[in-house]
Amino acid sequence: MTLVEHVKLAGVVGAGGGGFPTHVKLAAKADTVIANGAECEPLLHKDGAVMEHRAAELVRGMQLAMEAVGAKDGVIGIKAKNKHAVAAVTQACAGTAVRVHLLGDYYPAGDEYDLVYEVTGRLIPPAGIPINVGVVVGNVETFANVAAAATGRPVTHKTITIAGAVATPATLVVPIGTSFRDCIAAAGGATVADPVLCLGGMMMGETTDNLDTPITKTSTGAIVLSREHHVVARKLKPAKAQAAIGKSACDQCRYCTEYCPRFLLGYQVEPHQVMRSLAFTATGAAHWNQWAALCCSCGLCTLYACPEELFPKEACDNSKAQMRAANVKWTGPATVKPHPMRDGRRVPIKSLLRKLQLQDYDRPAPLRPAPLQPSRVTLRLKQSAGTPAIAAVKAGDTVTAGQVVAAPAANALGALLHAPFAARVETVTDTHLVLLRTA
Ligand code: SF4
Ligand code: SF4
């Protein structure tokens, strides 16, 4: 069986949040494979834990991926500050064609466009993807899962960090489908009365107060905060109010654009121009929206740059949604030239922590390697890019650990879903399965 087939059977998808099915990426041809260990969302440490504790698997997964795509160069991007991870991975790389590339401690070092440029000096064409410049990029946990897949082990568990207002921040290994409620309990419980979760981090994640949200293959963790926390309160403001404030208060100072990492890398992203569109009605949307098309939704403009605390990132998200709905593509220039001030304008994580009012929560979240043992899990049928999987079991069935419980339709983009433990199927719906542990 080929690696691509092994990876497909194991249900491996991008574990850093992207969720793109890995077997599709590994079917391409490339000269370079990059493992993204930048982990730039403040307070999250799951990639650091994977690199430190699964270093051999990570490097093995890289070697297998390089062989599959025909790459000569394999690079693991890690922030130099993650000394334990750097040491473990450097040791695991000895005698292989895989090497470590040290990154600075700034946000968003993990943006694919940024990482590919830092590691290879190549600029991805506007609206393109890494393979356009001969590179395959994946999260470090994804490559560790590739190595596991090659030995017949499917993806059934996830490494995540629970940080913020909890008694004992921790990085946990949990069966996919475990609720955040169980994870927060394992981290000693919330220390605020009305906790809200920033899933996947403060900068790019969604905000919810539903503690029963299940972990998926793309979860990276949650920052637990009070509903009254200043940044949470901003994020919870309804979209209509965000746009209304922007319309009346944006003074076109351009700070959002001048700090935008995509703008600084040379792409035509100018959020202040998108903000201008708020002052107009529907006229001209096609023009203004173009300035948002290459935005990576890093959140820096809204949560760091704007002195008026407006919402340029959300305006860009809205513009991109309008373009998708109207099937309008980006039409700007093909040339990309990094801004001469790029290096000097990078945002250090320490400054970002202060701006986000998170400095009191900047505590270690050490790995607990023994997996949690929840009595039930909720498996979402959509856990990857592409179409949702279709249940392959019915209520009342019993399943074994690692058994396939849902699969994408024939020839559809998606990934297999496996039971994380021996269980009885309690519920099957169009969107999820509930499994009750039997052993
Ligand atoms: S930084 Fe804020 S006030 Fe300045 S142009 Fe951007 S959205 Fe407007
Ligand atoms: S979210 Fe804002 S800062 Fe980030 S890429 Fe988009 S426009 Fe630029």
Image (cartoon, rainbow, N blue to C red):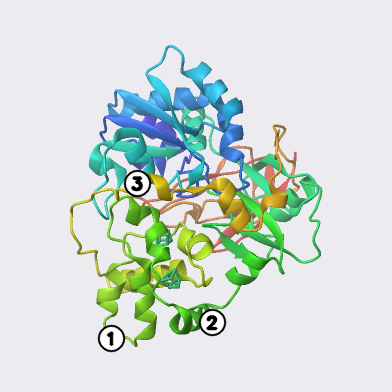
> Hey, which residue is sitting farthest bottom in the picture?
281
Q: Tell me where residue 298 appears, x and y as whole percent.
A: 46, 56
Whole-percent x and y of residue 177?
Answer: 63, 50
Disc 2 on helix, strand or loop?
helix
Residue pictured at 43% horizontal, 59% vertical = 297
Q: Is residue 100 visible?
A: yes
Tell me which residue sits at (53%, 82%) in the image.
241
The residue that disc 1 covers is 283
The span from disc 1 to disc 2 (Cα, nearest Å) is 21 Å
Is the residue at mark 1 in contact range of ligand 1, meaning its CB lies under 8 Å from it? Answer: no
User: Circle 2 is placed at which residue position?
Assistant: 241
Task: Say which amino acid is labelled 2.
Answer: Ala
Mark 1–mark 2 CB contact (< 8 Å): no
Q: Position of residue 64 (x, y in %)?
A: 39, 25
**Distance from label 1 to label 3 (Cα)?**
32 Å
- In the rendered image, the quadrant that contains the C terminus is top right
| Residue topped by disc 3 | 113
Give percent across and percent down for residue 263: 33, 56
| Image disc number at residue 377 | none
Q: With 106 as the anchor, is 295 left or right in this view? A: left
Residue 20 seen in render: no
Label 3 sits on a secondary structure element that is helix
Q: Which is nearer the eye, 306 or 56?
A: 306
- The image quadrant where one finds ligand 2 is bottom left
